[in-house]
Amino acid sequence: MTLLIVSPHRSDLSRWQQALQTCAPDLDIAVWPQVTVPEDITFALAWQQPAGIWQQFPNLRCVSSFGAGVDHLLQDVDLPTDTPIVRLVDPLLAQSMFEYIAAAVMGILRDFDVYETQQMGGLWQSHTPTLSQHCTVGIMGLGQLGTYTAQKLVKLGFNVVGWARSPKQIEGVTAYSGDAQLPQFLQQTQILVCLLPLTAQTRDILNLDLLAQLPRPAYLINVARGAHLVEADLLAALDAGYLRGACLDVFRQEPLPPTHPFWAHPKIRVTPHSSSITNPESVAPQIVENYRRSQTGAPLLNQVSRSRGY
Ligand code: GLV
């Protein structure tokens, strides 16, 4: 029985191997594409797996994502539909995500984007800062990352509203749910943060119609998936003055192609899918635990519902 690591574009796989081996010294680990006996593979840890990879592993019992998102596994038509999928739930992942969002939100609050532009023109002009209690941050997606971020932003003094598919209760946060309450959520959201899972319902959700419902000019932070955002609609919303800017960590095509208009857009800040990077040492115990559970048929931790899509 072997655990397979599949992540062709990741440069730190030996650190992952080491972290797993420290938790389970007797665990047999293979790193794709070096697989000598495909029949031995019973568990896989996968990210950006190549197409058509799963057919060669007839004894696969479970696949774990490398992170919180599982869309790369749910959309993989080659992964048998009865293979359970699990995701990683990790306090460090949530903390790191919050810290990225807090940095972006604070930068907007204190006009760092405006001052950056002014600096390029040598312009000395101050703007009265907005205070956190006068700023409403709206978080779309109130799962583990969204809830943690909302709670921390409340502690920083922001007004925080949230929106999710189903009703949620988070202390200090006004939470809206479902299509019917989306307009109410959007009408008050000055800084919109997308932390939604990518599903058929949420694909393309950040479109011109939605962005037009925000108070003007609002700001967009997308740290979920590139496919949530209709890219041409973001450019249109910036041109129309619906948005003052956007901070994007995820893109429809990653790496973002060198000629993509987002790179040079003065109102768009680009980061390379780095808002929250999984820490191998922190998540190795839950991967090993799920590996063990999958071998005995015990209930898995953080199993994803294929029908819900997260
Ligand atoms: C990163 O994008 C993740 O899904 O953890």
Image (cartoon, rainbow, N blue to C red):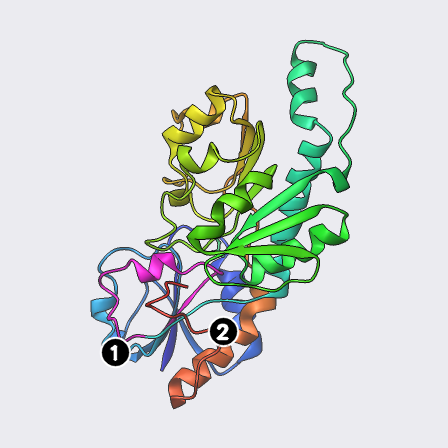
Instruction: Name the foreground residue: 102 vs 259.
Output: 102
Instruction: Name the foreground residue: 105 vs 287.
Output: 105
Q: Which residue is mark 2?
A: 287
Is 215 situated left or right of 212 in this image?
right
Kindly identify the residue that appears in the image at 22 percent across and 77 percent down. Answer: 58
Instruction: Name the foreground residue: 108 vs 258.
Output: 108
Kindly identify the residue that appears in the image at 50 percent across and 78 percent down. Answer: 288
Residue 33 seen in the current view: no
Where does the image place residue 109, in percent across and percent down from the top left?
Answer: 71, 33
Where does the image place residue 173, in percent across and percent down from the top left?
Answer: 66, 56
How many residues crowd around disc 1 within 10 Å: few (fewer than 14), some, or many (20 or more)? some
Q: Main secondary structure of the magenta part?
A: loop
First to last magenta residue range? 63-83
How many residues crowd around disc 2 within 10 Å: few (fewer than 14), some, or many (20 or more)? many
SS for dot 1: helix
Kindly identify the residue that appears in the image at 33 percent across and 57 percent down. Answer: 49
**Is the CB–ligand 1 distance for label 2 below 8 Å?**
no
Is 98 situated left or right of 245 in this image?
right
Q: Which residue is mark 1?
A: 39
Q: Is residue 5 magenta?
A: no
Displayed quadrant of residue 215: top right
First in sequence: mark 1 vs mark 2: 1
The quadrant of the rendering that contains the C terminus is: bottom left
